[in-house]
Image (spheres, rainbow, N blue to C red):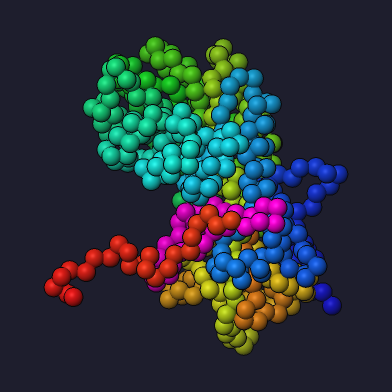
Amino acid sequence: MVSTHPLGIQASGSQYLPQKLNNTTLSPNQELLPLSARVNRHDSLEIGGCDVTTLVEQFGSPLYILDEETLRTACRQYHDTFKQYYKDESQVLYASKAWNCLAICAIVASEGLGIDVVSGGELYTALNAGVTPDKIYLHGNNKSRDELVLAIESGCTIVADNWYELKILVELATNSSPVRIMLRLTPGIECHTHEYIRTGHLDSKFGFDPNDLDQVFGFVSKQPSLNCVGLHAHIGSQIFERQPHRDLAAVMVQWLRDAAKYNLELTELNVGGGLGIKYTESDDPPSIEEWSKAICEVVQQACAAENLPLPKLLCEPGRSLIATACVTAYSIGSAKVIPDLRTYVTIDGGMSDNPRPITYQSVYRSVVANKMSAALTETVTLAGKHCESGDILIKNAQLPKTEPGDILVVMGTGAYNYSMASNYNRLPRPAAVLVANGEANLILLRENYQDIIRQDCLPERLK
Protein backbone atom coordinates (compact mmCIF):
# COMPACT_ATOMS: atom_id res chain seq x y z
CA MET A 1 0.00 0.00 0.00
CA VAL A 2 1.37 3.41 -0.96
CA SER A 3 1.73 5.70 2.02
CA THR A 4 0.77 9.36 2.11
CA HIS A 5 3.00 12.36 2.66
CA PRO A 6 2.02 14.59 5.62
CA LEU A 7 1.02 17.32 3.17
CA GLY A 8 -1.44 14.96 1.51
CA ILE A 9 0.36 14.33 -1.77
CA GLN A 10 0.88 10.96 -3.39
CA ALA A 11 3.77 9.15 -1.83
CA SER A 12 6.30 8.44 -4.58
CA GLY A 13 9.19 10.29 -6.13
CA SER A 14 7.21 10.87 -9.33
CA GLN A 15 4.99 13.40 -7.58
CA TYR A 16 7.76 15.99 -7.78
CA LEU A 17 8.16 15.80 -11.56
CA PRO A 18 7.27 18.91 -13.58
CA GLN A 19 3.75 18.64 -15.00
CA LYS A 20 3.49 20.28 -18.40
CA LEU A 21 -0.10 20.90 -19.55
CA ASN A 22 -1.03 21.63 -23.17
CA ASN A 23 2.64 21.93 -24.10
CA THR A 24 2.97 25.12 -22.05
CA THR A 25 6.38 26.32 -20.88
CA LEU A 26 6.72 25.99 -17.14
CA SER A 27 8.24 28.68 -14.93
CA PRO A 28 11.28 26.96 -13.41
CA ASN A 29 10.98 28.77 -10.07
CA GLN A 30 7.56 27.16 -9.54
CA GLU A 31 8.87 23.60 -9.89
CA LEU A 32 10.65 21.36 -7.40
CA LEU A 33 12.74 19.38 -9.91
CA PRO A 34 14.49 20.59 -13.08
CA LEU A 35 12.28 20.84 -16.17
CA SER A 36 13.96 17.86 -17.85
CA ALA A 37 13.41 15.51 -14.88
CA ARG A 38 11.92 12.13 -15.80
CA VAL A 39 11.66 8.62 -14.38
CA ASN A 40 13.18 6.07 -16.74
CA ARG A 41 12.37 2.38 -17.26
CA HIS A 42 14.80 1.45 -14.49
CA ASP A 43 12.71 3.47 -12.01
CA SER A 44 15.60 5.92 -11.73
CA LEU A 45 15.56 9.69 -11.88
CA GLU A 46 16.82 11.18 -15.12
CA ILE A 47 17.87 14.80 -15.55
CA GLY A 48 18.95 16.19 -18.90
CA GLY A 49 18.55 12.71 -20.34
CA CYS A 50 21.14 11.34 -17.89
CA ASP A 51 20.42 8.69 -15.27
CA VAL A 52 21.38 10.18 -11.90
CA THR A 53 22.64 6.85 -10.57
CA THR A 54 24.90 6.50 -13.60
CA LEU A 55 26.21 10.03 -13.09
CA VAL A 56 27.17 9.14 -9.53
CA GLU A 57 28.93 6.00 -10.74
CA GLN A 58 30.88 8.07 -13.25
CA PHE A 59 31.63 11.25 -11.29
CA GLY A 60 31.22 10.24 -7.64
CA SER A 61 29.20 11.83 -4.87
CA PRO A 62 28.26 14.27 -3.56
CA LEU A 63 27.59 15.63 -7.02
CA TYR A 64 25.95 18.85 -8.19
CA ILE A 65 23.88 18.13 -11.32
CA LEU A 66 22.97 21.24 -13.33
CA ASP A 67 20.24 21.00 -15.97
CA GLU A 68 21.04 23.27 -18.91
CA GLU A 69 17.44 23.28 -20.18
CA THR A 70 16.09 24.68 -16.92
CA LEU A 71 18.75 27.37 -16.64
CA ARG A 72 18.33 28.52 -20.23
CA THR A 73 14.52 28.50 -19.91
CA ALA A 74 14.67 30.76 -16.87
CA CYS A 75 17.08 33.13 -18.64
CA ARG A 76 14.81 33.36 -21.68
CA GLN A 77 11.68 33.92 -19.62
CA TYR A 78 13.27 36.88 -17.84
CA HIS A 79 14.81 38.29 -21.02
CA ASP A 80 11.70 37.89 -23.16
CA THR A 81 9.14 39.14 -20.63
CA PHE A 82 11.09 42.32 -19.93
CA LYS A 83 11.32 42.95 -23.67
CA GLN A 84 7.58 42.29 -23.97
CA TYR A 85 6.26 44.36 -21.07
CA TYR A 86 8.69 47.27 -20.82
CA LYS A 87 8.34 49.98 -23.44
CA ASP A 88 11.96 51.11 -23.32
CA GLU A 89 15.39 49.49 -23.01
CA SER A 90 15.93 46.82 -20.37
CA GLN A 91 18.71 44.52 -19.20
CA VAL A 92 18.42 41.43 -17.03
CA LEU A 93 21.51 40.68 -14.92
CA TYR A 94 22.28 37.35 -13.30
CA ALA A 95 23.09 37.83 -9.61
CA SER A 96 26.04 35.51 -9.80
CA LYS A 97 26.72 35.30 -6.08
CA ALA A 98 24.07 32.53 -6.22
CA TRP A 99 26.59 30.41 -8.18
CA ASN A 100 29.48 31.95 -10.03
CA CYS A 101 31.68 29.79 -12.25
CA LEU A 102 32.93 29.98 -15.83
CA ALA A 103 30.29 27.71 -17.36
CA ILE A 104 27.31 29.38 -15.72
CA CYS A 105 28.52 32.88 -16.58
CA ALA A 106 29.03 31.78 -20.19
CA ILE A 107 25.54 30.25 -20.43
CA VAL A 108 23.66 33.24 -19.05
CA ALA A 109 25.71 35.63 -21.20
CA SER A 110 24.86 33.57 -24.30
CA GLU A 111 21.18 34.13 -23.47
CA GLY A 112 21.65 37.92 -23.51
CA LEU A 113 21.91 38.45 -19.77
CA GLY A 114 24.49 40.58 -18.02
CA ILE A 115 26.24 39.64 -14.77
CA ASP A 116 25.97 41.15 -11.30
CA VAL A 117 29.17 40.46 -9.34
CA VAL A 118 30.04 41.26 -5.72
CA SER A 119 33.79 40.69 -5.54
CA GLY A 120 36.98 40.81 -7.53
CA GLY A 121 36.87 37.02 -7.82
CA GLU A 122 33.38 37.01 -9.31
CA LEU A 123 34.37 39.85 -11.65
CA TYR A 124 37.52 38.00 -12.75
CA THR A 125 35.46 34.85 -13.42
CA ALA A 126 32.85 36.71 -15.48
CA LEU A 127 35.53 38.41 -17.58
CA ASN A 128 37.28 35.10 -18.20
CA ALA A 129 33.96 33.54 -19.21
CA GLY A 130 33.78 36.08 -22.03
CA VAL A 131 31.16 38.41 -20.55
CA THR A 132 31.58 41.90 -22.00
CA PRO A 133 32.38 44.57 -19.36
CA ASP A 134 29.47 46.78 -20.41
CA LYS A 135 27.17 44.04 -19.09
CA ILE A 136 28.94 43.57 -15.74
CA TYR A 137 27.92 45.47 -12.60
CA LEU A 138 30.08 45.32 -9.46
CA HIS A 139 28.28 45.48 -6.10
CA GLY A 140 29.56 45.27 -2.54
CA ASN A 141 29.48 47.23 0.70
CA ASN A 142 33.26 47.17 1.30
CA LYS A 143 35.01 46.85 -2.04
CA SER A 144 38.78 46.85 -1.69
CA ARG A 145 40.97 49.30 -3.53
CA ASP A 146 42.31 46.42 -5.65
CA GLU A 147 38.76 45.37 -6.57
CA LEU A 148 37.90 48.92 -7.58
CA VAL A 149 41.05 49.17 -9.69
CA LEU A 150 40.19 45.89 -11.46
CA ALA A 151 36.66 47.16 -12.11
CA ILE A 152 37.88 50.49 -13.46
CA GLU A 153 40.49 48.88 -15.69
CA SER A 154 37.98 46.34 -17.04
CA GLY A 155 35.39 49.01 -17.80
CA CYS A 156 32.44 47.56 -15.89
CA THR A 157 29.87 49.61 -13.96
CA ILE A 158 30.51 50.09 -10.23
CA VAL A 159 27.52 50.28 -7.91
CA ALA A 160 28.78 52.70 -5.23
CA ASP A 161 27.55 51.76 -1.78
CA ASN A 162 28.90 54.35 0.69
CA TRP A 163 30.84 57.57 1.22
CA TYR A 164 34.15 55.80 1.81
CA GLU A 165 33.90 54.11 -1.58
CA LEU A 166 32.86 57.27 -3.39
CA LYS A 167 35.92 59.09 -2.11
CA ILE A 168 38.24 56.25 -3.16
CA LEU A 169 36.68 56.27 -6.62
CA VAL A 170 37.33 60.01 -6.93
CA GLU A 171 40.98 59.32 -6.04
CA LEU A 172 41.32 56.51 -8.57
CA ALA A 173 39.35 58.01 -11.44
CA THR A 174 40.55 60.53 -13.98
CA ASN A 175 38.62 63.32 -15.67
CA SER A 176 39.72 62.07 -19.08
CA SER A 177 38.09 58.70 -18.47
CA PRO A 178 35.22 59.02 -15.97
CA VAL A 179 34.23 55.92 -14.01
CA ARG A 180 30.74 54.65 -14.77
CA ILE A 181 28.84 54.28 -11.48
CA MET A 182 25.40 53.77 -10.03
CA LEU A 183 24.35 54.66 -6.49
CA ARG A 184 22.89 52.05 -4.15
CA LEU A 185 20.26 53.44 -1.81
CA THR A 186 18.40 51.80 1.07
CA PRO A 187 14.67 52.14 0.36
CA GLY A 188 13.38 51.34 3.86
CA ILE A 189 11.00 48.62 2.66
CA GLU A 190 10.37 45.52 4.77
CA CYS A 191 9.36 42.16 3.33
CA HIS A 192 8.57 38.85 4.97
CA THR A 193 11.73 36.83 4.50
CA HIS A 194 14.59 35.60 6.66
CA GLU A 195 16.29 38.33 8.69
CA TYR A 196 19.67 37.58 7.08
CA ILE A 197 18.38 38.05 3.53
CA ARG A 198 16.40 41.27 4.04
CA THR A 199 18.45 44.08 2.56
CA GLY A 200 15.94 46.84 1.86
CA HIS A 201 15.00 47.96 5.38
CA LEU A 202 16.74 50.98 6.87
CA ASP A 203 18.73 48.95 9.40
CA SER A 204 20.94 47.37 6.74
CA LYS A 205 24.66 47.38 6.02
CA PHE A 206 23.95 48.04 2.34
CA GLY A 207 23.52 51.36 0.56
CA PHE A 208 23.30 55.06 1.29
CA ASP A 209 20.72 56.19 3.81
CA PRO A 210 17.87 57.99 1.98
CA ASN A 211 18.22 60.85 4.46
CA ASP A 212 21.64 61.55 2.90
CA LEU A 213 20.22 61.74 -0.61
CA ASP A 214 20.73 65.48 -1.15
CA GLN A 215 24.33 65.30 0.08
CA VAL A 216 25.11 62.30 -2.11
CA PHE A 217 23.58 63.83 -5.24
CA GLY A 218 25.30 67.12 -4.54
CA PHE A 219 28.70 65.50 -4.10
CA VAL A 220 28.46 63.27 -7.18
CA SER A 221 27.26 66.13 -9.38
CA LYS A 222 30.51 68.00 -8.67
CA GLN A 223 32.82 65.10 -9.61
CA PRO A 224 33.73 65.19 -13.33
CA SER A 225 35.63 61.91 -12.87
CA LEU A 226 32.42 60.08 -11.94
CA ASN A 227 29.80 59.31 -14.57
CA CYS A 228 26.74 58.51 -12.49
CA VAL A 229 24.22 56.77 -14.74
CA GLY A 230 21.57 55.47 -12.37
CA LEU A 231 20.24 54.17 -9.09
CA HIS A 232 20.09 50.74 -7.50
CA ALA A 233 18.09 49.24 -4.64
CA HIS A 234 17.36 45.72 -3.47
CA ILE A 235 14.78 44.65 -0.90
CA GLY A 236 15.76 41.05 -0.17
CA SER A 237 15.62 37.45 -1.33
CA GLN A 238 13.15 34.55 -1.56
CA ILE A 239 10.23 37.00 -1.80
CA PHE A 240 6.73 35.92 -2.81
CA GLU A 241 4.97 39.23 -2.10
CA ARG A 242 4.39 41.75 -4.88
CA GLN A 243 3.53 44.89 -2.92
CA PRO A 244 7.12 45.55 -1.73
CA HIS A 245 8.29 45.81 -5.34
CA ARG A 246 5.42 48.18 -6.16
CA ASP A 247 6.51 50.35 -3.24
CA LEU A 248 10.14 50.13 -4.34
CA ALA A 249 9.37 51.35 -7.86
CA ALA A 250 7.50 54.38 -6.55
CA VAL A 251 10.33 55.29 -4.16
CA MET A 252 13.06 54.88 -6.77
CA VAL A 253 11.27 56.99 -9.38
CA GLN A 254 10.96 59.76 -6.79
CA TRP A 255 14.73 59.53 -6.31
CA LEU A 256 15.18 59.92 -10.06
CA ARG A 257 13.09 63.09 -9.89
CA ASP A 258 15.18 64.41 -6.99
CA ALA A 259 18.45 63.76 -8.84
CA ALA A 260 17.34 66.06 -11.65
CA LYS A 261 17.57 69.01 -9.22
CA TYR A 262 21.33 68.48 -9.22
CA ASN A 263 21.58 68.22 -13.02
CA LEU A 264 22.27 64.51 -12.77
CA GLU A 265 20.96 62.80 -15.88
CA LEU A 266 20.25 59.35 -14.50
CA THR A 267 19.19 56.95 -17.25
CA GLU A 268 19.23 53.56 -15.49
CA LEU A 269 17.13 52.10 -12.71
CA ASN A 270 18.05 48.75 -11.12
CA VAL A 271 15.24 47.34 -8.96
CA GLY A 272 17.25 44.35 -7.73
CA GLY A 273 15.87 40.84 -7.71
CA GLY A 274 14.53 38.65 -4.97
CA LEU A 275 11.86 36.49 -6.61
CA GLY A 276 11.51 33.30 -4.60
CA ILE A 277 11.37 29.67 -5.67
CA LYS A 278 9.41 26.59 -4.71
CA TYR A 279 11.49 24.69 -2.15
CA THR A 280 8.51 22.79 -0.72
CA GLU A 281 4.99 21.90 -1.84
CA SER A 282 3.50 24.73 0.22
CA ASP A 283 5.64 27.42 -1.44
CA ASP A 284 3.70 29.44 -4.02
CA PRO A 285 5.95 32.03 -5.69
CA PRO A 286 4.79 34.14 -8.64
CA SER A 287 6.04 32.93 -11.98
CA ILE A 288 8.97 34.66 -13.66
CA GLU A 289 6.57 36.21 -16.17
CA GLU A 290 4.18 37.43 -13.46
CA TRP A 291 6.99 39.01 -11.47
CA SER A 292 8.63 40.59 -14.52
CA LYS A 293 5.34 41.97 -15.83
CA ALA A 294 4.52 43.50 -12.45
CA ILE A 295 7.94 45.17 -12.21
CA CYS A 296 7.68 46.61 -15.71
CA GLU A 297 4.17 47.92 -15.10
CA VAL A 298 4.87 49.61 -11.76
CA VAL A 299 8.00 51.39 -13.02
CA GLN A 300 6.14 52.67 -16.09
CA GLN A 301 3.22 53.80 -13.93
CA ALA A 302 5.50 55.56 -11.46
CA CYS A 303 7.37 57.37 -14.24
CA ALA A 304 4.10 58.47 -15.81
CA ALA A 305 2.87 59.79 -12.46
CA GLU A 306 6.07 61.85 -12.06
CA ASN A 307 6.10 62.86 -15.75
CA LEU A 308 9.57 61.38 -16.18
CA PRO A 309 11.01 59.62 -19.24
CA LEU A 310 11.43 55.88 -18.87
CA PRO A 311 14.90 54.84 -17.70
CA LYS A 312 16.71 51.75 -18.86
CA LEU A 313 15.27 49.14 -16.50
CA LEU A 314 17.56 46.57 -14.90
CA CYS A 315 16.84 43.69 -12.56
CA GLU A 316 19.17 41.10 -11.06
CA PRO A 317 17.57 37.71 -10.32
CA GLY A 318 19.82 35.02 -8.91
CA ARG A 319 18.06 32.26 -6.99
CA SER A 320 15.05 32.14 -9.35
CA LEU A 321 17.39 31.64 -12.32
CA ILE A 322 19.64 28.91 -11.00
CA ALA A 323 18.19 27.19 -7.91
CA THR A 324 15.74 24.76 -9.49
CA ALA A 325 18.16 23.97 -12.32
CA CYS A 326 20.40 22.01 -9.96
CA VAL A 327 20.05 19.02 -7.65
CA THR A 328 22.65 17.44 -5.39
CA ALA A 329 23.12 13.67 -5.43
CA TYR A 330 24.47 11.90 -2.33
CA SER A 331 25.23 8.29 -1.45
CA ILE A 332 23.43 6.99 1.60
CA GLY A 333 25.57 5.41 4.29
CA SER A 334 24.86 4.46 7.88
CA ALA A 335 21.57 4.59 9.79
CA LYS A 336 20.84 4.98 13.49
CA VAL A 337 17.46 4.04 14.93
CA ILE A 338 16.50 5.58 18.27
CA PRO A 339 13.28 3.71 19.22
CA ASP A 340 10.21 5.91 19.63
CA LEU A 341 12.25 9.02 18.88
CA ARG A 342 14.10 9.30 15.56
CA THR A 343 15.86 7.49 12.76
CA TYR A 344 19.00 9.10 11.38
CA VAL A 345 20.05 8.28 7.82
CA THR A 346 23.49 9.58 6.92
CA ILE A 347 24.72 10.91 3.59
CA ASP A 348 28.27 11.47 2.32
CA GLY A 349 27.99 15.26 2.36
CA GLY A 350 26.17 17.87 4.39
CA MET A 351 26.91 21.33 5.69
CA SER A 352 30.13 21.73 3.68
CA ASP A 353 28.28 21.42 0.36
CA ASN A 354 24.95 22.89 1.56
CA PRO A 355 25.30 25.22 4.55
CA ARG A 356 21.84 26.75 4.15
CA PRO A 357 19.92 24.47 6.56
CA ILE A 358 22.33 25.13 9.44
CA THR A 359 22.68 28.83 8.51
CA TYR A 360 19.15 29.84 7.52
CA GLN A 361 17.10 26.87 8.75
CA SER A 362 16.28 26.29 5.09
CA VAL A 363 13.92 23.44 4.16
CA TYR A 364 14.43 21.10 1.20
CA ARG A 365 12.72 18.12 -0.40
CA SER A 366 14.43 14.89 -1.43
CA VAL A 367 13.88 11.65 -3.34
CA VAL A 368 15.77 8.39 -3.62
CA ALA A 369 16.92 8.49 -7.23
CA ASN A 370 17.07 4.71 -7.69
CA LYS A 371 13.64 4.07 -6.10
CA MET A 372 11.43 6.70 -7.66
CA SER A 373 8.15 4.75 -7.51
CA ALA A 374 8.69 3.14 -4.10
CA ALA A 375 6.22 3.89 -1.33
CA LEU A 376 7.30 6.38 1.30
CA THR A 377 7.32 4.14 4.34
CA GLU A 378 9.91 5.86 6.53
CA THR A 379 10.23 9.20 8.29
CA VAL A 380 13.89 9.93 8.82
CA THR A 381 16.29 12.73 9.62
CA LEU A 382 18.92 13.12 6.93
CA ALA A 383 22.22 13.82 8.64
CA GLY A 384 25.47 15.00 7.15
CA LYS A 385 28.83 13.40 7.85
CA HIS A 386 30.46 16.38 9.56
CA CYS A 387 31.52 16.42 13.19
CA GLU A 388 28.73 18.80 14.12
CA SER A 389 25.42 17.89 15.76
CA GLY A 390 23.68 20.60 13.78
CA ASP A 391 24.74 19.08 10.46
CA ILE A 392 21.19 18.07 9.55
CA LEU A 393 20.14 18.43 5.92
CA ILE A 394 16.42 17.58 6.22
CA LYS A 395 14.34 16.80 9.29
CA ASN A 396 11.44 14.37 9.01
CA ALA A 397 12.11 13.45 5.40
CA GLN A 398 9.58 11.06 3.87
CA LEU A 399 11.49 8.29 2.09
CA PRO A 400 11.10 4.70 0.96
CA LYS A 401 13.08 2.13 2.89
CA THR A 402 16.72 2.94 2.20
CA GLU A 403 19.92 0.96 2.17
CA PRO A 404 23.59 1.93 2.08
CA GLY A 405 24.51 2.84 -1.48
CA ASP A 406 21.10 4.26 -2.42
CA ILE A 407 21.30 7.64 -4.13
CA LEU A 408 19.57 10.51 -2.38
CA VAL A 409 18.74 13.58 -4.45
CA VAL A 410 18.06 16.94 -2.80
CA MET A 411 16.20 19.41 -4.99
CA GLY A 412 16.65 23.12 -5.57
CA THR A 413 20.34 23.30 -4.70
CA GLY A 414 21.59 25.59 -7.46
CA ALA A 415 21.58 28.76 -5.38
CA TYR A 416 24.00 29.34 -2.52
CA ASN A 417 25.13 25.72 -2.24
CA TYR A 418 28.36 25.53 -4.22
CA SER A 419 28.92 29.27 -3.81
CA MET A 420 28.83 28.92 0.01
CA ALA A 421 30.52 25.51 0.13
CA SER A 422 33.52 25.03 2.38
CA ASN A 423 36.20 22.54 3.30
CA TYR A 424 34.88 22.09 6.82
CA ASN A 425 36.46 18.98 8.38
CA ARG A 426 38.80 19.23 5.37
CA LEU A 427 36.29 17.64 3.05
CA PRO A 428 37.02 18.27 -0.63
CA ARG A 429 34.29 20.22 -2.38
CA PRO A 430 32.11 18.22 -4.81
CA ALA A 431 32.24 18.11 -8.58
CA ALA A 432 29.53 19.69 -10.73
CA VAL A 433 28.27 18.45 -14.09
CA LEU A 434 26.17 20.16 -16.73
CA VAL A 435 23.62 17.82 -18.31
CA ALA A 436 21.78 18.21 -21.60
CA ASN A 437 20.51 15.86 -24.31
CA GLY A 438 21.88 12.79 -22.58
CA GLU A 439 25.39 14.20 -22.20
CA ALA A 440 27.16 15.21 -19.01
CA ASN A 441 30.12 17.60 -18.94
CA LEU A 442 32.18 18.52 -15.92
CA ILE A 443 32.02 22.23 -15.11
CA LEU A 444 33.75 21.96 -11.73
CA LEU A 445 36.32 19.31 -10.87
CA ARG A 446 36.03 17.45 -7.58
CA GLU A 447 38.67 18.61 -5.15
CA ASN A 448 41.12 16.07 -3.79
CA TYR A 449 43.29 15.91 -0.70
CA GLN A 450 46.17 17.58 -2.51
CA ASP A 451 43.87 20.53 -3.24
CA ILE A 452 43.05 20.70 0.46
CA ILE A 453 46.69 21.28 1.48
CA ARG A 454 47.73 23.24 -1.61
CA GLN A 455 47.69 26.60 0.17
CA ASP A 456 49.15 25.27 3.44
CA CYS A 457 52.60 26.50 4.41
CA LEU A 458 54.81 24.54 6.77
CA PRO A 459 57.60 26.63 8.34
CA GLU A 460 61.05 25.14 7.86
CA ARG A 461 61.62 24.69 11.58
CA LEU A 462 58.57 22.38 11.79
CA LYS A 463 59.71 20.03 9.09
Question: Which picture quadrant has residue 202?
Answer: top left
Q: Which residues are magenta?
A: 412-440
On-image quarter of the N terminus: bottom right
Q: Is residue 304 rendered to the left or right of residue 105?
A: right
Q: What residue do we see at 66% from left, 68% from top?
A: 54
Q: Is residue 19 above or below residue 236?
A: below
Q: Is residue 105 above or below residue 91?
A: below
* Front one among 319 and 285: 319
Where in the figure is residue 224, as x and y percent of width and height? 30, 16
* Front one among 220 and 348: 348
* Front one among 291 and 110: 110
Where in the figure is residue 323, as x and y percent of width and height? 59, 51
Q: Is residue 297 magenta?
A: no
On-image quarter of the C terminus: bottom left
Q: Is residue 415 magenta?
A: yes
* Front one among 249 and 407: 407
One can see residue 360 in this view:
no
Q: What residue do we see at 56% from left, 29% from top?
A: 91
Where in the figure is residue 449, as x and y percent of width and height? 39, 70
Q: What residue do we see at 29% from left, 17% from top?
A: 176
Q: Is residue 338 rendered to the left or right of residue 196?
A: right
Q: Main secondary structure of the magenta part?
A: loop
Query: Looking at this rendering, what residue extends furthest in the left direction?
Result: 461
One can see residue 180 in this view:
yes
Where in the figure is residue 74, as x and y percent of width and height? 65, 42
Q: Is residue 453 rendered to the left or right of residue 369?
A: left
Q: Is residue 246 above or below residue 350?
A: above
Q: Is residue 83 above or below residue 399?
A: above
Q: What is the count of numbered marks?
A: 0
Q: What residue do we see at 58% from left, 21% from top?
A: 89
Q: Is residue 159 rendered to the left or right of residue 369?
A: left
